[in-house]
Structure formats: C-alpha cells, structure tokens
Amino acid sequence: MRFILILIVLAALTGCGMRLNSAPANERPVGTLIPTSATTPAPAAPVATAVAGTPAQPPAAPTSVPTQPLPAPAQPELPTASQMPQIALQQIVEGFDRPLHITHAGDGSGRLFVVEKVGRIRIVRNGQALPEPFLDITDRVGARANEQGLLSVAFHPRYRENGWLFVNYTDTEGNTVVSRFSAEGDRADPSSEEVVLTIEQPFANHNGGLIVFGPDGMLYVGMGDGGSAGDPLGAGQDRWTFLGKILRINADTLPYTIPPDNPWADGSGGRQEVWILGVRNPWRFSFDRATGDLFVADVGQNRLEEVHMLPAGKSAGANLGWNIMEGNECFRHNDCDRRTLDLPIDVYPHSLGCSVTGGHVYRGAAFPALQGVYVFGDFCSGRIWGLRPSASGWERTELWQSNIQIAAFGEDEAGELYVAGYNNGVLYRIVVE
C-alpha cells in the first residue's frame, strides 16, 4: 500500500518540478511521533484551463552621574542554532481527510479550524473534532489535482462582531476563488457565499492558495505562477498579472477596495492589488505576531527550496526573484542581475526535501526555549526545521524528522504551534522534549 501511495504522489507532483525524497535508512528520527494507521492517497492531477482575473476596482529624567566610570554593559549573546531545543509531536486528533490548513478565529473561543482538501472545514475543541463540519462546500470545490481543493480559511479581524470568514479554493473549472461566508456559533452558512475575487488558472498546479489577514487588517492572497514548470507565462516578473504574486486588498466591504499604500495603487505600473512579486508557489506564508515581519516559504523548481523574511514595513513591492532566480542561484542565466531582488534568508537542496511548507514564528508561552524560532518543514521528506538569526546570520537546525507529509502548520490564539499530516490525517501539537 505504501509503495502504491508513493507512486501516486510522485505522479501528481511531476508537473510541479517536485519529487518525493525518502530519508536515509540510517538516519535517526529527531523527536517523537505517535503513529496512526490511517493513510489517504493523493488524487491524480488533471489540467485546468484559461488565465488572469478581473477584480473590482477602487476607489514619541534626569540621571545621576557616577563618580567612577562604569564598565560597558555586556552585549546579549545572539542565539546559535545549537541552542535550539528538540521538539516532539503530540497527537491531538486523527481522522481528517487530507488536511491543508490550521488556524483559529481570534474570537476567544479556543477553537482550532482544520481545512480539508475536499472542501470541508472542521472544528477542534478541547482536543476533540466536532462531528459536524463548520463549513461544507464540497459541491463547488474542485479537488481532483494534487494542488487543488479548499486551500485555506481566514477569519476577519472583527469576526466576533461580524461573523465573516474568507476561504480560498479552486472551483470545478480549476480556477481560484476567494469568497466570504457568514457564520454563527459552530456553523458557517454555505448559502451565504459572496465571491470576492476569481482568477483563472492556466494549469492545475501552482495555485498558491493561502489567504491571511495581516497586522494591518488587510487580506493577503498568495498566488502561484500558474503552473506547468519553469514559469512558461513569465508571470513571476509580470506586474500585470495576479499569477506569481502576493496580493493585498481591503475586504472590509464588497466589492473589495485597493489599499492606497499598495505599490501600484494608482494602476500606472502594475495591477493595483499586487503587493509582492516574483514568487513561484508561495504555498504558506505568515506574519510574526510579535514583530509583524513577513515570512514567505516559496516552493522551488528542480533544485532549491527557499524562505524569505521581509521586515515589517518593508515588504511593499518586494521582488522575491522567480523566475530570474531559484533560491539564491540564477535560474536561466548564470549572470542574472540580483541587485533589485529580495534574496532568501535560507535555502535547502532537494537532497533534504522537495516542497517547502511554511510555518510560524513561535510566540507561545509554554516553551520558552522555542521563543522566536521560525518553525517550518518539507512536504516530501517530513523534516521540520527551526530557523532564527545568530551572530553569523540566519541558521537552520533540524528539529524533527519522520514520514508524515507536512502540508500545514498552524497556531492557536495563544501562539502554540500545530502540524497536520496530509497522508495520515492526524493533527499534532508541537512540544519541546
């Protein structure tokens, strides 16, 4: 059965320039995992048709003087990679169908919401999954290809007041749809859908799919380059297409409006919604809840996976390089011009994995040793790493390794971190050993 599963996933990922890599047999797993027997094979991948979308348009005491000079204050030591703690995965709930996203509603309820690829959102309360889905839109979600389906959910910053949630999914034609729904209690109304944005997809892969509200209250939408391989449409560097971008819109009203501080808000140099360009498939990105810094994990082509960090207030108009570069190397020409590009803080080769899954900076209170560490992983190899700055720059440490396919990290209202196994349908909490 496992051999069949690997063949299916390999076939589905071939068109994305990805491949599954197994950990060497003599490599010891780091951390602990409580396994389950449930596995769900990835579906086969058809090809969607068409390109580009047409959204709505806008409108800051005296001190005593010592008699003897004081020694210079000691400078705090920057953490090193070797100081990072080892983690373990604590099983919370099993039985999910290919979970792709984990988040909370920010409403004080303590609930976790787990997005299933097929088109359902499930609630986890007090360590138990509720039997009825929070939202079921399987009737309008196209989930046949490996990178299609219901891909994420984002709750409005004033969700407790207005009951609005936003989802990103591929429809039965393979196109990207961002919609708003209304909810009350533990149920969202499937008939309350209001479409915010529709973007035609030329291929079945590289759909991006994450939506998240930033610290500024704006809705950020991750869009892949449209698919196939090598960015045949040149979307990454084309400011006039939504593909290969991270978009930023004001979704407080519908139709949405353009934030006036977007880089091309006047429409003269690119699409008004574009915030970041030059991404291949930004499957997952997140804001550090303490600093506002933006971490973007961008899935690579044939050789390198990459993570970018854009400091708070400095991400507008950032160019992450695709398809001029893959990771920190020129992609098509050895003499590419990097001067205007925002280079990654970390890259890793396909000997360690083949599809980066972005995570979160840990800001919880339960595990002080993990504080400030950006935790992320790889879908193919099952590795989880920690990344944080040190005296020599950003350093990466492997925190854990096993055979689960990591498609989603998430955090709860308190900042504790979770990970979901795509292949076994299990939700885990990340703990420090």
Image (cartoon, helix red, strand yellow):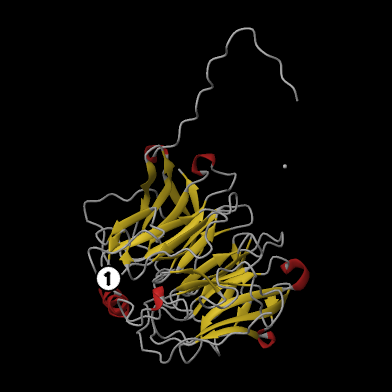
For the C terminus, which image quadrant?
top left
Residue 196 placement: quadrant: bottom right
Residue type, numbered disc 1: Arg
Which residue is situated farthest in the front direction here? 268
Task: Classify residue 266 as left or right of residue 332.
Answer: right
Front-most of residues 397 and 287: 287
123 versus 430 height, above or below = below
SS under mark 1: loop
Residue identified by numbered label 1: 19
Q: For this rendering, which residue is in front, 344 or 189?
A: 344
State which quadrant residue 1 falls in: bottom left
In the image: residue 220, left or right of residue 253: left
Q: Residue at 37%, 51% (x, y): give it.
A: 400
User: Can see residue 17?
Assistant: yes
Asked if 122 appears above or below 310 in the picture, the reply is below
Q: Which percent across, then down, holds residue 181?
A: 67, 80
Q: Is residue 203 above or below residue 413?
A: below
Residue 94 placement (x, y as % from top left): 49, 66
State the image quarter where residue 231 is shown.
bottom left
Q: Residue at x 52, y 19 (%)?
A: 72
Q: Is residue 136 above or below residue 124?
A: below
Badge 1, how many Cα within 10 Å: few under 14, some, many 20+? Answer: many
Q: Report the residue at 39% width, 43% height from top.
A: 393
